Image (cartoon, rainbow, N blue to C red):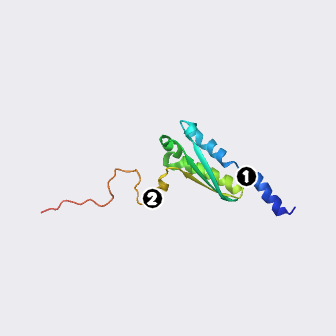
Amino acid sequence: MPPEMADTQQSLANEPDYLELIRFLITPFLESADSLRLHCEKSRVDKLWIRVAFDPKDKGSVYGRGGRNIQAIRKVLNVAASLAGQTVRLDIYGDSSDRPSGERSGRGSGRSHAPRSRPRRN
């Protein structure tokens, strides 16, 4: 067997179980682990797209302050994928980045950021 084929077969056998890794990383942040839903789609041998859904009330704890928790989870996934020679994209169902461009995020007071008009002085 040529060495290239042996390397390919070995890398497929050593592919990380991304769904279990995500379940392990996200479950401690959830009030109910049963609310976690995972979906994995392989577009090619080296590219995966993973979608995660959970109870919306857990969003704050999963994301963490400033998004630090979800950034760390994505970093761990990317490191595991790069060691396996793959690319992984993690999307959170209902995330604001999935929102069409015309919609506003739920942040702020709802006021526009246009300059305020000042009363005229007579």
- Residue at (54% x, 48% y) in the render: 68
Q: How many marks?
A: 2
What element does badge 1 sit on?
Answer: loop
Residue 13: % across, % down: 77, 52
Question: Callout 2, which amino acid?
Answer: Pro
Question: Picture coordinates of residue 107 (x, y %)?
Answer: 40, 50
Q: In this figure, which residue is indicated by the disc labeled 1? A: 15
Instruction: Please state which of the two labelled residues, at mark 1 or mark 2, is closer to the viewer.
Output: 2
| Residue 105, x across and y down, in percent | 41, 53
Judged from this view, the residue extending furthest toward the top is 32
| Image quadrant where one finds the C terminus | bottom left
- Give the residue at x 66% y 49%: 18
Residue at image position (82%, 61%) is 5
The quarter holding residue 104 reads bottom left
Q: Position of residue 69 (x, y in %)?
A: 55, 46
Task: Indicate the quadrant where residue 12 lies.
Answer: bottom right
Q: Which residue is mark 2?
A: 100
**Which part of the image, by quadrant, shows the N terminus?**
bottom right
Amino acid carrying mark 1 in the image: Glu
Q: Disc 1 or 2, which lies upstream in sequence?
A: 1
Q: Residues within 10 Å of mark 1 (few under 14, many from 20)?
A: some
**Looking at the rendering, which quadrant does residue 29 occupy?**
top right
Q: In this rendering, would 53 be left or right of 17? A: left
Residue 6, numbered label: none
Residue in view at x 26 percent, y 59 percent? 116
Query: Distance between the Cα atoms at labels 1 and 2?
Result: 34 Å
Name the foreground residue: 95 vs 38.
38
Mark 2 is surrounded, within 10 Å at the Cα level, by few (under 14), some (14 to 19) or many (20 or more) other residues, namely: few
